[in-house]
Image (cartoon, rainbow, N blue to C red):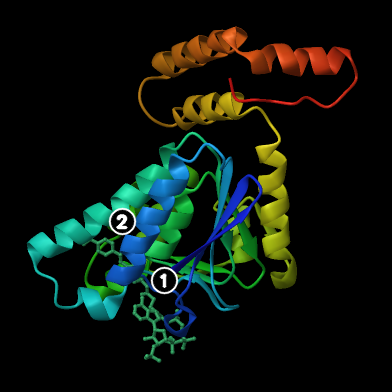
Amino acid sequence: MPIDIERREATALVTVNRPEALNALDVAHLEDLHDAVDSLRSDDAVRAIVLTGAGEKAFIAGADIKYMRDLEVLAAREWGALGHRIGTMLETMPKPTIAAVNGFALGGGCELALACDIRLASANAKFGQPEVNLGIIPGWGGTVRLARTTSLGFAKELIFSGRIVGAAEAESRGLVNHVYEPGELLNAALELADGLTAKSPIAMAYAKEATSLALQGDHKEGLETEARLFSMLFASKDQREGMTAFIEKRDADFVGR
Ligand code: DAK
Protein backbone atom coordinates (compact mmCIF):
# COMPACT_ATOMS: atom_id res chain seq x y z
CA MET A 1 0.00 0.00 0.00
CA PRO A 2 1.29 3.51 -0.74
CA ILE A 3 0.09 4.65 2.69
CA ASP A 4 -0.23 2.33 5.69
CA ILE A 5 -2.87 3.03 8.32
CA GLU A 6 -2.50 1.25 11.63
CA ARG A 7 -5.23 1.75 14.19
CA ARG A 8 -4.09 1.47 17.76
CA GLU A 9 -7.26 1.99 19.76
CA ALA A 10 -8.13 5.68 19.30
CA THR A 11 -4.78 6.63 17.72
CA ALA A 12 -4.23 6.17 13.97
CA LEU A 13 -0.65 5.78 12.77
CA VAL A 14 -0.31 6.89 9.13
CA THR A 15 2.93 5.87 7.40
CA VAL A 16 4.02 7.06 3.96
CA ASN A 17 5.45 3.88 2.54
CA ARG A 18 7.96 4.54 -0.23
CA PRO A 19 11.32 4.20 1.52
CA GLU A 20 13.20 3.41 -1.73
CA ALA A 21 12.54 7.04 -2.80
CA LEU A 22 12.85 8.46 0.73
CA ASN A 23 9.04 8.61 0.87
CA ALA A 24 8.88 11.29 -1.84
CA LEU A 25 5.24 11.79 -2.77
CA ASP A 26 4.29 10.78 -6.31
CA VAL A 27 0.68 10.82 -7.54
CA ALA A 28 -0.23 7.42 -6.06
CA HIS A 29 1.18 8.29 -2.66
CA LEU A 30 -0.23 11.82 -2.56
CA GLU A 31 -3.72 10.68 -3.58
CA ASP A 32 -3.66 7.81 -1.12
CA LEU A 33 -2.42 10.12 1.64
CA HIS A 34 -5.28 12.49 0.86
CA ASP A 35 -7.84 9.68 1.09
CA ALA A 36 -6.31 8.30 4.30
CA VAL A 37 -6.33 11.67 6.06
CA ASP A 38 -9.83 12.42 4.76
CA SER A 39 -11.28 9.14 6.07
CA LEU A 40 -9.59 9.43 9.49
CA ARG A 41 -10.74 13.02 9.80
CA SER A 42 -14.41 12.02 9.83
CA ASP A 43 -14.02 8.81 11.82
CA ASP A 44 -15.20 9.47 15.37
CA ALA A 45 -13.39 6.38 16.67
CA VAL A 46 -10.08 8.07 15.80
CA ARG A 47 -9.10 10.77 18.30
CA ALA A 48 -5.49 11.49 17.28
CA ILE A 49 -3.30 10.96 14.21
CA VAL A 50 0.45 10.36 14.00
CA LEU A 51 2.05 10.89 10.57
CA THR A 52 5.46 9.37 9.82
CA GLY A 53 7.58 7.89 7.03
CA ALA A 54 8.70 4.30 6.43
CA GLY A 55 12.33 3.37 7.03
CA GLU A 56 15.02 5.07 9.04
CA LYS A 57 16.15 7.74 6.62
CA ALA A 58 13.20 9.90 5.76
CA PHE A 59 9.91 11.33 6.89
CA ILE A 60 9.04 12.66 3.42
CA ALA A 61 11.82 13.95 1.12
CA GLY A 62 9.35 16.18 -0.69
CA ALA A 63 7.09 16.00 -3.68
CA ASP A 64 8.37 13.68 -6.41
CA ILE A 65 10.76 15.74 -8.52
CA LYS A 66 10.79 13.17 -11.35
CA TYR A 67 7.00 13.49 -11.67
CA MET A 68 6.94 17.27 -11.34
CA ARG A 69 9.62 18.00 -13.93
CA ASP A 70 7.24 17.75 -16.90
CA LEU A 71 4.16 19.33 -15.33
CA GLU A 72 2.48 22.19 -17.15
CA VAL A 73 0.85 25.13 -15.42
CA LEU A 74 -2.66 23.70 -14.96
CA ALA A 75 -1.39 20.31 -13.83
CA ALA A 76 0.99 22.04 -11.41
CA ARG A 77 -1.93 24.01 -10.03
CA GLU A 78 -3.90 20.79 -9.40
CA TRP A 79 -0.86 19.12 -7.87
CA GLY A 80 -0.45 22.09 -5.54
CA ALA A 81 -4.17 22.05 -4.66
CA LEU A 82 -4.08 18.39 -3.67
CA GLY A 83 -1.15 18.97 -1.29
CA HIS A 84 -2.89 22.05 0.08
CA ARG A 85 -6.05 20.05 0.78
CA ILE A 86 -4.07 17.53 2.82
CA GLY A 87 -2.33 20.30 4.78
CA THR A 88 -5.61 22.07 5.48
CA MET A 89 -7.25 18.84 6.66
CA LEU A 90 -4.35 18.12 9.05
CA GLU A 91 -4.49 21.68 10.33
CA THR A 92 -8.26 22.01 10.76
CA MET A 93 -9.61 18.55 11.58
CA PRO A 94 -11.12 18.51 15.07
CA LYS A 95 -8.49 16.18 16.53
CA PRO A 96 -4.76 16.51 17.12
CA THR A 97 -2.26 15.64 14.40
CA ILE A 98 1.35 14.83 15.27
CA ALA A 99 4.26 14.56 12.82
CA ALA A 100 6.90 12.03 13.89
CA VAL A 101 9.76 13.29 11.74
CA ASN A 102 12.17 10.38 11.43
CA GLY A 103 14.69 11.74 8.91
CA PHE A 104 14.50 14.05 5.86
CA ALA A 105 11.52 16.40 5.92
CA LEU A 106 12.23 18.45 2.83
CA GLY A 107 10.05 20.58 0.59
CA GLY A 108 6.53 19.14 0.68
CA GLY A 109 7.61 16.88 3.56
CA CYS A 110 8.51 19.84 5.73
CA GLU A 111 5.27 21.52 4.66
CA LEU A 112 3.11 18.56 5.70
CA ALA A 113 4.93 18.36 9.03
CA LEU A 114 4.22 22.08 9.48
CA ALA A 115 0.52 21.48 8.84
CA CYS A 116 0.41 19.08 11.82
CA ASP A 117 -0.36 20.49 15.24
CA ILE A 118 2.78 19.12 16.93
CA ARG A 119 6.15 18.02 15.51
CA LEU A 120 8.43 15.53 17.22
CA ALA A 121 11.75 14.70 15.57
CA SER A 122 14.50 12.12 15.73
CA ALA A 123 18.02 13.43 16.36
CA ASN A 124 18.88 12.61 12.72
CA ALA A 125 15.94 14.57 11.27
CA LYS A 126 16.65 17.24 8.67
CA PHE A 127 14.31 20.04 7.69
CA GLY A 128 14.35 22.40 4.75
CA GLN A 129 12.55 24.08 1.89
CA PRO A 130 15.05 23.52 -0.92
CA GLU A 131 12.56 24.31 -3.73
CA VAL A 132 14.59 27.36 -4.79
CA ASN A 133 17.31 24.95 -5.97
CA LEU A 134 14.75 23.42 -8.36
CA GLY A 135 13.58 26.74 -9.75
CA ILE A 136 10.31 26.74 -7.80
CA ILE A 137 8.99 27.89 -4.42
CA PRO A 138 7.23 25.97 -1.64
CA GLY A 139 3.73 25.12 -2.88
CA TRP A 140 2.02 23.23 -0.08
CA GLY A 141 1.80 26.01 2.50
CA GLY A 142 5.46 26.40 3.48
CA THR A 143 5.77 30.12 2.81
CA VAL A 144 2.99 30.78 5.31
CA ARG A 145 3.26 28.00 7.89
CA LEU A 146 7.05 28.06 8.30
CA ALA A 147 6.91 31.78 9.12
CA ARG A 148 3.96 31.34 11.47
CA THR A 149 5.62 28.42 13.28
CA THR A 150 9.09 29.94 13.59
CA SER A 151 9.74 33.54 12.59
CA LEU A 152 9.50 35.51 9.38
CA GLY A 153 13.26 36.05 9.22
CA PHE A 154 14.10 32.38 9.75
CA ALA A 155 11.48 31.29 7.21
CA LYS A 156 12.82 33.72 4.62
CA GLU A 157 16.38 32.54 5.24
CA LEU A 158 15.46 28.87 4.74
CA ILE A 159 13.21 29.48 1.74
CA PHE A 160 15.62 31.87 -0.01
CA SER A 161 18.73 29.78 0.63
CA GLY A 162 17.38 26.22 0.58
CA ARG A 163 19.54 25.56 3.64
CA ILE A 164 18.85 22.26 5.43
CA VAL A 165 18.80 22.38 9.23
CA GLY A 166 19.26 19.59 11.74
CA ALA A 167 16.95 18.60 14.58
CA ALA A 168 18.74 20.65 17.25
CA GLU A 169 18.50 23.88 15.26
CA ALA A 170 14.90 23.08 14.32
CA GLU A 171 14.08 22.65 18.00
CA SER A 172 15.82 25.90 18.93
CA ARG A 173 13.67 27.72 16.35
CA GLY A 174 10.37 26.20 17.49
CA LEU A 175 10.07 24.17 14.31
CA VAL A 176 9.88 20.99 16.40
CA ASN A 177 8.53 20.53 19.91
CA HIS A 178 10.94 17.80 21.10
CA VAL A 179 13.85 15.71 19.80
CA TYR A 180 14.38 12.00 20.55
CA GLU A 181 16.90 9.31 19.77
CA PRO A 182 15.82 7.63 16.50
CA GLY A 183 14.77 4.39 18.23
CA GLU A 184 12.59 6.30 20.68
CA LEU A 185 10.76 8.70 18.38
CA LEU A 186 7.79 6.62 17.31
CA ASN A 187 6.99 5.41 20.81
CA ALA A 188 7.20 8.97 22.09
CA ALA A 189 4.81 10.15 19.38
CA LEU A 190 2.36 7.32 20.01
CA GLU A 191 2.52 7.88 23.76
CA LEU A 192 1.78 11.57 23.29
CA ALA A 193 -1.10 10.74 20.94
CA ASP A 194 -2.54 8.11 23.29
CA GLY A 195 -2.44 10.63 26.13
CA LEU A 196 -4.39 13.12 24.01
CA THR A 197 -7.01 10.52 23.08
CA ALA A 198 -7.87 10.16 26.77
CA LYS A 199 -8.94 13.81 26.97
CA SER A 200 -12.41 15.06 26.14
CA PRO A 201 -12.67 15.01 22.31
CA ILE A 202 -14.99 17.99 22.31
CA ALA A 203 -12.68 20.05 24.55
CA MET A 204 -9.77 18.96 22.33
CA ALA A 205 -11.61 20.05 19.17
CA TYR A 206 -12.44 23.46 20.66
CA ALA A 207 -8.91 23.87 22.04
CA LYS A 208 -7.53 23.23 18.53
CA GLU A 209 -10.04 25.55 16.86
CA ALA A 210 -9.39 28.42 19.27
CA THR A 211 -5.59 28.04 19.43
CA SER A 212 -5.32 27.80 15.65
CA LEU A 213 -6.71 31.34 15.42
CA ALA A 214 -3.85 32.74 17.50
CA LEU A 215 -1.68 33.76 14.57
CA GLN A 216 -4.31 34.54 12.01
CA GLY A 217 -7.16 37.00 11.62
CA ASP A 218 -8.25 39.58 14.06
CA HIS A 219 -7.03 39.46 17.71
CA LYS A 220 -10.39 40.52 19.15
CA GLU A 221 -12.23 37.97 17.05
CA GLY A 222 -9.86 35.27 18.35
CA LEU A 223 -10.63 36.19 21.95
CA GLU A 224 -14.36 36.22 21.21
CA THR A 225 -14.14 32.77 19.65
CA GLU A 226 -12.33 31.50 22.74
CA ALA A 227 -15.03 32.93 25.00
CA ARG A 228 -17.81 31.40 22.86
CA LEU A 229 -16.23 27.93 22.70
CA PHE A 230 -15.33 28.03 26.41
CA SER A 231 -18.91 28.75 27.44
CA MET A 232 -20.40 26.22 24.99
CA LEU A 233 -18.48 23.46 26.76
CA PHE A 234 -20.66 24.04 29.80
CA ALA A 235 -23.49 22.45 27.79
CA SER A 236 -21.47 19.22 27.41
CA LYS A 237 -21.52 15.99 29.38
CA ASP A 238 -17.71 16.06 29.29
CA GLN A 239 -17.48 19.31 31.30
CA ARG A 240 -19.72 17.86 34.00
CA GLU A 241 -17.82 14.54 33.92
CA GLY A 242 -14.34 16.15 34.03
CA MET A 243 -15.18 18.34 37.01
CA THR A 244 -17.10 15.58 38.84
CA ALA A 245 -14.17 13.19 38.32
CA PHE A 246 -11.81 15.77 39.84
CA ILE A 247 -14.05 16.23 42.87
CA GLU A 248 -14.50 12.45 43.28
CA LYS A 249 -10.72 11.89 42.87
CA ARG A 250 -11.05 9.46 39.93
CA ASP A 251 -10.14 9.41 36.22
CA ALA A 252 -12.65 11.06 33.93
CA ASP A 253 -14.45 8.99 31.31
CA PHE A 254 -15.12 11.37 28.45
CA VAL A 255 -17.72 10.67 25.77
CA GLY A 256 -17.18 13.57 23.38
CA ARG A 257 -20.56 15.22 23.93
N1 DAK B 1 11.62 13.19 -5.58
C1 DAK B 1 11.90 12.04 -6.26
N2 DAK B 1 12.82 11.14 -5.85
C2 DAK B 1 13.49 11.42 -4.74
C3 DAK B 1 13.27 12.59 -3.97
C4 DAK B 1 12.27 13.51 -4.45
N3 DAK B 1 11.92 14.61 -3.78
N4 DAK B 1 14.11 12.58 -2.93
C5 DAK B 1 14.84 11.45 -3.00
N5 DAK B 1 14.46 10.73 -4.11
C6 DAK B 1 14.99 9.45 -4.56
C7 DAK B 1 16.32 9.62 -5.27
O1 DAK B 1 16.11 10.01 -6.60
C8 DAK B 1 16.88 8.21 -5.15
O2 DAK B 1 16.25 7.38 -6.09
P1 DAK B 1 17.13 6.60 -7.22
O3 DAK B 1 17.80 7.67 -7.97
O4 DAK B 1 18.06 5.75 -6.42
O5 DAK B 1 16.10 5.85 -7.99
C9 DAK B 1 16.40 7.78 -3.77
O6 DAK B 1 15.29 8.62 -3.43
C10 DAK B 1 17.45 7.94 -2.70
O7 DAK B 1 17.90 9.29 -2.73
P2 DAK B 1 19.46 9.71 -2.79
O8 DAK B 1 20.24 8.64 -3.47
O9 DAK B 1 19.50 11.08 -3.35
O10 DAK B 1 19.81 9.70 -1.24
P3 DAK B 1 20.93 10.56 -0.51
O11 DAK B 1 20.98 10.05 0.88
O12 DAK B 1 22.18 10.65 -1.30
O13 DAK B 1 20.32 12.06 -0.48
C11 DAK B 1 18.59 13.72 -0.13
C12 DAK B 1 19.19 12.34 0.28
C13 DAK B 1 17.26 13.88 0.62
C14 DAK B 1 19.55 14.84 0.34
C15 DAK B 1 18.42 13.78 -1.65
O14 DAK B 1 17.67 12.64 -2.05
C16 DAK B 1 17.64 15.00 -2.09
O15 DAK B 1 18.16 16.10 -2.13
N6 DAK B 1 16.36 14.80 -2.46
C17 DAK B 1 15.54 15.88 -2.96
C18 DAK B 1 15.06 16.74 -1.81
C19 DAK B 1 14.25 17.89 -2.31
O16 DAK B 1 14.68 18.76 -3.05
N7 DAK B 1 12.99 17.92 -1.87
C20 DAK B 1 12.06 18.96 -2.21
C21 DAK B 1 11.32 18.52 -3.42
S1 DAK B 1 10.38 19.85 -4.09
C22 DAK B 1 3.81 22.61 -5.93
C23 DAK B 1 3.52 22.29 -4.67
C24 DAK B 1 4.45 21.65 -3.87
C25 DAK B 1 5.68 21.36 -4.35
C26 DAK B 1 5.95 21.67 -5.62
C27 DAK B 1 5.03 22.28 -6.43
N8 DAK B 1 2.84 23.28 -6.76
C28 DAK B 1 1.94 24.21 -6.19
C29 DAK B 1 2.94 23.13 -8.10
C30 DAK B 1 6.65 20.71 -3.53
C31 DAK B 1 7.91 20.62 -3.95
C32 DAK B 1 8.91 19.80 -3.32
O17 DAK B 1 8.68 19.10 -2.36
Count the marks: how many? 2
In depth, the one of 214 and 113 nearer the eye is 113
Measured Cα–Cα span from mark 2 to mark 1? 16 Å
Q: From where the camera sits, is residue 37 visible?
A: yes
Give SS at disc 2.
helix
Q: From where the camera sits, is residue 147 visible?
A: no
Q: Quadrant of the C terminus?
A: top right
Residue 66, percent across and down? 26, 81
Q: Residues within 10 Å of mark 1 (few under 14, many from 20)?
A: some
In depth, the one of 36 and 73 nearer the eye is 36
Residue at 46% in and 51% down: 114
Q: Quadrant of the N terminus?
A: bottom left
Give SS at disc 1.
loop
Vertical side of 84 occupied by 218: above or below: above
Label 1 CB-ligand 1 distance < 8 A = no
Label 2 CB-ligand 1 distance < 8 A = yes
> Which amino acid type corresponds to the residue marked 1 in the rendered image?
Pro
Asked if labels 1 and 2 touch by Cβ distance under 8 angstroms, the answer is no
Q: Is 152 on the left or on the right of 171, as rendered?
A: left
Residue at 57% in and 78% down: 55
* Quadrant in the rendering for residue 47: top right
For this orientation, the residue located farthest to the bottom is 20
Q: Can you tell which of label 2 and label 1 is closer to the viewer?
A: 1
Q: Is 99 on the left or on the right of 180, as rendered?
A: left
Query: Which residue is under mark 2?
Result: 83
Residue 135, percent across and down? 22, 72
Residue 173, percent across and down? 57, 52
Q: Is 118 on the left or on the right of 218, as rendered?
A: right
Query: Which residue is under mark 1?
Result: 2
In depth, the one of 23 and 178 nearer the eye is 23
